[in-house]
Image: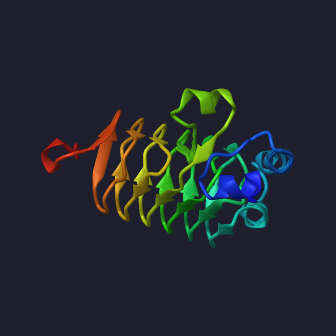
Protein backbone atom coordinates (compact mmCIF):
# COMPACT_ATOMS: atom_id res chain seq x y z
CA UNK A 1 0.00 0.00 0.00
CA UNK A 2 1.47 3.34 -1.08
CA UNK A 3 1.39 6.39 1.15
CA UNK A 4 -0.36 9.56 0.05
CA UNK A 5 3.05 11.22 -0.35
CA UNK A 6 4.27 8.37 -2.58
CA UNK A 7 1.14 8.77 -4.70
CA UNK A 8 1.72 12.54 -4.91
CA UNK A 9 5.34 12.11 -6.02
CA UNK A 10 4.25 9.57 -8.67
CA UNK A 11 1.67 11.97 -10.15
CA UNK A 12 -1.27 9.87 -8.97
CA UNK A 13 -4.41 11.04 -7.19
CA UNK A 14 -3.62 11.77 -3.54
CA UNK A 15 -5.15 13.33 -0.43
CA UNK A 16 -3.39 16.66 0.28
CA UNK A 17 -4.76 16.62 3.84
CA UNK A 18 -2.59 13.62 4.73
CA UNK A 19 -0.58 14.35 7.93
CA UNK A 20 2.80 13.58 6.30
CA UNK A 21 2.07 15.94 3.41
CA UNK A 22 0.78 18.62 5.79
CA UNK A 23 3.99 18.28 7.81
CA UNK A 24 6.06 18.84 4.67
CA UNK A 25 3.95 21.90 3.79
CA UNK A 26 4.48 23.33 7.29
CA UNK A 27 8.25 22.75 7.07
CA UNK A 28 8.31 24.44 3.66
CA UNK A 29 6.42 27.48 4.99
CA UNK A 30 9.10 27.87 7.64
CA UNK A 31 11.84 27.60 5.00
CA UNK A 32 10.08 30.15 2.73
CA UNK A 33 9.89 32.63 5.63
CA UNK A 34 13.68 32.30 6.15
CA UNK A 35 14.46 32.47 2.44
CA UNK A 36 12.23 35.45 1.73
CA UNK A 37 13.63 37.30 4.76
CA UNK A 38 17.11 36.87 3.22
CA UNK A 39 16.53 39.37 0.39
CA UNK A 40 19.50 41.49 1.47
CA UNK A 41 21.70 38.52 2.46
CA UNK A 42 24.79 37.75 0.41
CA UNK A 43 24.19 35.61 -2.68
CA UNK A 44 26.20 32.71 -1.18
CA UNK A 45 23.95 32.63 1.89
CA UNK A 46 20.79 32.53 -0.26
CA UNK A 47 22.34 29.80 -2.41
CA UNK A 48 23.10 27.74 0.72
CA UNK A 49 19.42 28.03 1.72
CA UNK A 50 18.37 26.79 -1.74
CA UNK A 51 20.88 23.93 -1.67
CA UNK A 52 19.64 22.82 1.75
CA UNK A 53 16.03 22.62 0.60
CA UNK A 54 15.86 21.87 -3.15
CA UNK A 55 16.55 18.49 -4.76
CA UNK A 56 19.36 20.32 -6.60
CA UNK A 57 20.55 23.94 -6.73
CA UNK A 58 23.28 24.36 -9.33
CA UNK A 59 26.30 26.57 -8.92
CA UNK A 60 25.58 30.22 -9.63
CA UNK A 61 21.79 29.90 -9.58
CA UNK A 62 19.95 32.97 -8.26
CA UNK A 63 16.34 33.12 -7.12
CA UNK A 64 15.30 36.60 -6.01
CA UNK A 65 12.95 36.71 -3.04
CA UNK A 66 10.07 36.69 -2.64
CA UNK A 67 9.82 33.15 -3.94
CA UNK A 68 7.03 30.66 -3.27
CA UNK A 69 6.79 26.88 -3.64
CA UNK A 70 4.75 23.98 -2.23
CA UNK A 71 7.56 21.71 -1.03
CA UNK A 72 10.98 22.61 -2.48
CA UNK A 73 12.31 19.04 -2.40
CA UNK A 74 10.88 18.39 -5.88
CA UNK A 75 12.73 21.31 -7.51
CA UNK A 76 15.99 20.87 -9.45
CA UNK A 77 17.64 24.02 -10.74
CA UNK A 78 20.74 23.91 -12.96
CA UNK A 79 23.86 26.06 -13.06
CA UNK A 80 23.47 29.81 -13.60
CA UNK A 81 19.68 29.71 -13.56
CA UNK A 82 17.98 33.02 -12.73
CA UNK A 83 14.45 33.50 -11.37
CA UNK A 84 13.37 37.09 -10.86
CA UNK A 85 11.16 38.42 -8.06
CA UNK A 86 7.83 36.84 -7.12
CA UNK A 87 8.04 33.50 -8.93
CA UNK A 88 5.82 30.58 -7.87
CA UNK A 89 6.65 26.88 -8.32
CA UNK A 90 3.89 24.45 -7.34
CA UNK A 91 6.07 21.36 -7.04
CA UNK A 92 3.83 18.47 -5.98
CA UNK A 93 5.98 16.42 -8.34
CA UNK A 94 9.27 17.10 -10.12
CA UNK A 95 10.05 20.50 -11.59
CA UNK A 96 13.38 20.66 -13.45
CA UNK A 97 14.98 23.84 -14.79
CA UNK A 98 18.07 23.47 -17.01
CA UNK A 99 21.38 25.32 -16.94
CA UNK A 100 21.43 28.96 -17.99
CA UNK A 101 17.66 29.42 -18.05
CA UNK A 102 16.34 32.92 -17.26
CA UNK A 103 12.87 33.38 -15.81
CA UNK A 104 11.19 36.79 -15.51
CA UNK A 105 9.25 38.17 -12.56
CA UNK A 106 5.92 36.69 -11.45
CA UNK A 107 6.27 33.53 -13.53
CA UNK A 108 4.20 30.57 -12.33
CA UNK A 109 5.41 27.01 -12.89
CA UNK A 110 2.57 24.69 -11.96
CA UNK A 111 3.01 20.94 -11.61
CA UNK A 112 -0.10 20.71 -9.38
CA UNK A 113 -3.32 19.64 -11.06
CA UNK A 114 -6.86 18.53 -10.20
CA UNK A 115 -8.89 15.58 -11.47
CA UNK A 116 -11.42 16.22 -14.21
CA UNK A 117 -13.98 14.01 -12.46
CA UNK A 118 -16.22 16.20 -10.25
CA UNK A 119 -16.63 13.47 -7.64
CA UNK A 120 -12.87 13.17 -7.20
CA UNK A 121 -12.59 16.96 -6.87
CA UNK A 122 -15.41 16.99 -4.27
CA UNK A 123 -13.46 14.35 -2.36
CA UNK A 124 -10.54 16.81 -2.23
CA UNK A 125 -8.16 14.69 -4.30
CA UNK A 126 -5.30 16.28 -6.23
CA UNK A 127 -2.56 15.11 -8.58
CA UNK A 128 0.41 16.48 -10.46
CA UNK A 129 2.39 16.22 -13.67
CA UNK A 130 6.14 16.98 -13.89
CA UNK A 131 7.35 20.15 -15.59
CA UNK A 132 10.68 20.19 -17.44
CA UNK A 133 12.30 23.40 -18.65
CA UNK A 134 15.42 22.88 -20.76
CA UNK A 135 18.75 24.70 -20.94
CA UNK A 136 19.14 28.34 -21.99
CA UNK A 137 15.37 28.97 -22.02
CA UNK A 138 14.05 32.51 -21.59
CA UNK A 139 10.60 32.85 -19.98
CA UNK A 140 9.16 36.36 -19.97
CA UNK A 141 7.53 37.96 -16.93
CA UNK A 142 4.07 36.84 -15.89
CA UNK A 143 4.10 33.66 -17.97
CA UNK A 144 2.35 30.55 -16.67
CA UNK A 145 3.69 27.04 -17.35
CA UNK A 146 0.99 24.39 -16.80
CA UNK A 147 1.28 20.78 -15.53
CA UNK A 148 3.02 18.23 -17.73
CA UNK A 149 4.69 20.78 -20.02
CA UNK A 150 8.24 20.33 -21.33
CA UNK A 151 10.01 23.36 -22.78
CA UNK A 152 12.96 22.44 -25.01
CA UNK A 153 16.46 23.90 -24.90
CA UNK A 154 16.91 27.44 -26.28
CA UNK A 155 13.15 28.12 -26.44
CA UNK A 156 11.59 31.51 -25.65
CA UNK A 157 8.24 32.02 -23.91
CA UNK A 158 6.76 35.50 -24.33
CA UNK A 159 5.76 37.49 -21.27
CA UNK A 160 2.22 36.82 -20.06
CA UNK A 161 1.92 33.62 -22.08
CA UNK A 162 0.02 30.58 -20.82
CA UNK A 163 1.92 27.45 -21.90
CA UNK A 164 -0.56 24.58 -22.09
CA UNK A 165 1.46 22.29 -24.40
CA UNK A 166 5.10 21.29 -24.67
CA UNK A 167 7.40 23.62 -26.62
CA UNK A 168 10.03 22.17 -29.00
CA UNK A 169 13.67 23.20 -28.65
CA UNK A 170 14.53 26.54 -30.24
CA UNK A 171 10.89 27.59 -30.64
CA UNK A 172 9.45 30.97 -29.62
CA UNK A 173 5.89 30.87 -28.28
CA UNK A 174 3.55 33.59 -27.05
CA UNK A 175 -0.09 34.17 -26.22
CA UNK A 176 -2.93 32.49 -24.36
CA UNK A 177 -2.71 29.68 -25.12
CA UNK A 178 0.92 29.99 -26.18
CA UNK A 179 1.47 29.25 -29.86
CA UNK A 180 4.63 29.19 -31.97
CA UNK A 181 5.51 32.46 -33.66
CA UNK A 182 6.67 32.41 -37.24
CA UNK A 183 9.92 34.27 -37.96
CA UNK A 184 8.07 37.16 -39.66
CA UNK A 185 5.89 37.81 -36.60
CA UNK A 186 8.79 38.07 -34.17
CA UNK A 187 9.57 41.68 -33.28
CA UNK A 188 13.22 42.70 -33.38
Q: In this view of the protein, which residue sits in the foreground, 142 or 53?
A: 53
Q: Is residue 106 above or below residue 95?
A: above
* Side of 5 where 88 appears, left or right: left
Looking at the rendering, which quadrant does residue 55 occupy? bottom right
Coloring applied to the structure: rainbow
Could you tell me residue 176's position as x and y percent?
A: 35, 33
Q: Is residue 80 above or below residue 120?
A: below
Could you tell me residue 126's position as x and y percent?
A: 64, 40
* Side of 183 where 1 appears, left or right: right
Q: In this view of the protein, which residue sits in the foreground, 47 or 109?
A: 109
x 65%, y 50%: residue:
92
Looking at the rendering, which quadrant does residue 10 occupy? bottom right
Could you tell me residue 188's position as x and y percent?
A: 22, 47
Could you tell me residue 185's position as x and y percent?
A: 17, 42
Q: In this view of the protein, which residue sits in the foreground, 120 or 92?
A: 120
Q: Is residue 54 above or below residue 23?
A: below
x 60%, y 59%: residue:
94
Q: Is residue 85 visible?
A: no
x 34%, y 57%: residue:
155
* Side of 128 where 152 appears, left or right: left
Outermost residue, front side: 1
x 29%, y 51%: residue:
172
Classify the position of the N terminus by image quarter. bottom right
The number of numbered discs placed on residues in the rendered structure image is 0
Outermost residue, left side: 184
Q: Is residue 20 visible?
A: yes
Amino acid sequence: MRTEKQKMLAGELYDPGDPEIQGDIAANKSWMARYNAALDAPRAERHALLASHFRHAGEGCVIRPPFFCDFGFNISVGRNVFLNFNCVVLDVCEVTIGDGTQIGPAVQIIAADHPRDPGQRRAGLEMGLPVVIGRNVWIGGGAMILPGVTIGDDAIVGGGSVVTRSVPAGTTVAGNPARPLTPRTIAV
